[in-house]
Structures are given as structure tokens and as C-alpha cells.
Amino acid sequence: MRIHRLVAVLLILVVVASCAPSHPTPTPVSAAVPILSPSPTATPTLAPAATVAAGTPLAPGSSIRRVPQPGDATLLADLLEYIPAGLVDLHLSGHVGYPMHYIDVARIRQDLGIGSLTGADDRKAKLDLIAGLKIQGLELAPFELDPTAATAYEEWGWDIADVAQCLYLPTDKAVIVAGEFDADTVVDRLVQKGYSGTADSGSTIYAAADEEWYFVVDDDCLLISADLTTLQVFISQKLDPASSLAIHPSMLALLQEAQPMWGALLTTSSDLSGLRQYLTESNFWAALPARERAALHEFLDPSDDDTCLYRWDLALLTFRNAQEEPNQRYLYHYISEEQANEEAASLPDQLARVHSVANTASTWAEILVPYSSEAQGEVLVFEATTAHETMLGLGTMEWMDVGFLPIHCDTEQ
């Protein structure tokens, strides 16, 4: 299901992002409709938290952010300072509400015992790292900027060997990359491609008339987007970290329960009612083979008396492919401890009875073998093991295969 941008949503998110609530209030799925277009497939673009004023270019050697050490969730929090807190209220009518792909390459290197590397090194020295990137089908960056590509360093002046962490927003084709970069080399490559820099709020944005991408280049951070406004969002939001997603109460609760990870799918909950409507009004539902359609019916059947929705507002679905188990730790934030407890108790049963759409012969309990399901305050902590190599990636999600996410159904008597 392809999603299209909706520029009109910019004004709505400006208002939302400027208000950091003292306590999260999950948006009912029916209330999510006003921030979308009449088409449930529409996708908004991030909006600036404040007006972007012209400023001074970055001085050589200056930095947007520090380079963290591999380890815990504070690394993710650093990158989330570029994202408006209002994104928590964005519940799209798709597979998930608004997905972000986070990969901690530094942690992967540490766990794999891979030593120091730079993009300038011979490609053979990088092959162990590239082969070890078992990242659950998540993406590091837009396909055109894949840092594992053989030509990445020669084309852009950086590649996977320079990356520490990255946060990719596939909906908006934008990525925030932390690492140790040779800024002069990166800028030289851009200039060779026809890019030039423009001062913007203390940063320099590089753009070219015949190129798709916009860049902000620094020694320890790259900001890249296919949309200028999205890049300006990152810049302006970083100047106001008190209104960023990093300090939103829902996000703080999830980060507190996070453990060392290789990466994660961070997402808001989707609008299930909008997804159900899309499936019934489009040709998608009818075109599905009977077994796949039956699997979706288990929680999205429009003729059923059940009213199913997500009661969690934000989820951090983490993984780590180290030797110890479990290697999947999924965290869901709820409005109350009572709701988190209820769904911690019901999730194993849901997994045991709901089939995968992509693999209809198996229930989710066979694909995602439960290890534990419990509430820690307002956070449901679910741990499991899986042999599925693209559990969290777009390869699974494009099938609306969301049966492993906690779903609450009220049956009318």
C-alpha cells in the first residue's frame, strides 16, 4: 500500500509539536481521522516546531551533537531530539501509525568483535560488518543512500563503516545518522555533484537543482531528507529539545524499560478503523487469497461485531541478535497501569490464535515464541525469541501483518 504526502497536515503538526503534554493521552482511532486526508492512505510530512530563521553556517569542526558510546537507549534519545513530540499523536491508517527504524551499528560492531573502521578503508575490511547486519528487515536509510553499497563511500564520502547509529523515517524518506564523518570529504563529494550550501538556523543545508536529496553535514552527524521542510524540522527541533519526542512522557517510559539493543522499530499505533475501511473499499481485500484474507479476518473483519483497536499509543520493538535469549523485547506504552496489565495477560492468547498473513500455516505464537509478558507500570514488556529474519521490517508490514501487536476487542452482546 503506497502512501502519499499531505502538505496540509503541516499546520496541524506545528500546533501539536509545540505542546508537550504533562501526561500522554492516547488518541482514539476515530479521532485520528482529522489529521489525515479523506483517503486513509494519505501520509503527512513532519512539520517545523518553530519558524526557521536564517543563521550562520556551522564552523569547521563544530558539532550538532556529541558522539555517544555504544550501549543503551540514551543513544536513541539523542537522535529523537530532532523529532517533534507531536508525532506521538500521528495515527495513520496503515500497518503501523508512523514508523521509525533505529539501528545501533556501533553496538552491532561491538557484539561482533569488529574493530575500528572508516569509510576510506578497503571494502574487504567492511564485509564482516555488512554480513553481520541482521537487522530484522529494517532499513538504515533510503535505498538510494544505502551505506552498505559498494559505491557508497566513493559517491557520498561516507558509508556503513562511519556510522554509529541511524534513525530512518521511511514515510518521509529522511534519516539522521550519527557517527564519525570526515565532513570535508562529504562536502567535497556533494560539491562535485553540484551541491551548494545555504545558511539556515546555525546549520548549512546543501542542495542541488538536479538532485533529490538535501543534506546537513557535520563531523559527527548527517541529516538527510528528500524534502527541505523535513530537514528544517530537524534543525529547528534540535534547538528546542524540551519539545522533542525524546522527552515525551510516553517515550520516556519506553526508554526506561529498554535494554541494550541492535535496533528497533519505533512506531505510533495505527488507526485500525481506517485500515479496515481501506481494506473493504479497495480491491486489496478481494484480491487476497482466501487463507490470507481469513488471517486478516481474525482481527479486522468488517462484518464482525467486534470493535478492535490499539490502546497503546507508542511502541518500541527492540531486538538484539546476541547469544543470550530473548532476542526480541517489545515495549508498548498505555494510558494506565491497569490497561498494561490487562493486555500483558491477553497478548499470549492473541498470539496463539491469530495466524500470520504472510505465513498462514503458522500462528504468531509459533513465529514469535513468547518468553514473558508483563506490565512494568504503564509499559507492557513482551519478550520472545524468533527465527524470523525480517520480523520488524517492511517485508512483513506491507502485508498488514500486525497480528503480533496487542489488539483490544470489545464484543457487543
Image (tube, rainbow, N blue to C red):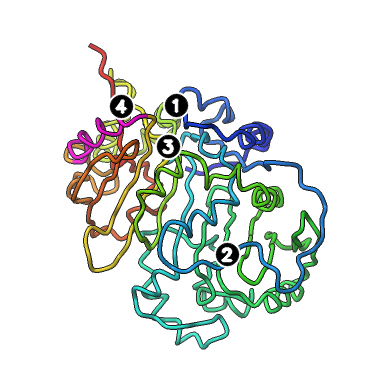
Q: Looking at numbered disc 3 in the image, what kind of residue is underneath it? A: Ser
Of callouts 1 and 2, which one flags the residue occurring earlier in the amino acid sequence? 1
Front of the two marks 1 and 2: 1
Q: Looking at numbered disc 2 in the image, what kind of residue is underneath it? A: Glu
Front of the two marks 2 and 3: 3
**Is residue 200 left or right of 323 when viewed as pictured?**
right
* Residue denoted by label 4: 301
The residue sitting at 19% across, 44% down in the picture is 363
* Residue denoted by label 2: 144
Q: Which residues are magenta?
A: 336-351
Q: In the image shown, does 3 or 219 lie closer to the viewer?
A: 219
**Is residue 23 left or right of 413 when viewed as pictured?**
right
Q: Using the numbered discs, state the Cα–Cα distance from disc 3 to disc 1 in whole angstroms.
A: 9 Å
The location of residue 290, given as percent across then percent down, is 26, 37
Of callouts 1 and 4, which one flags the residue occurring earlier in the amino acid sequence? 1
**Residue furthest out toward the top:** 413
286 over 164 or under it: above or below: above
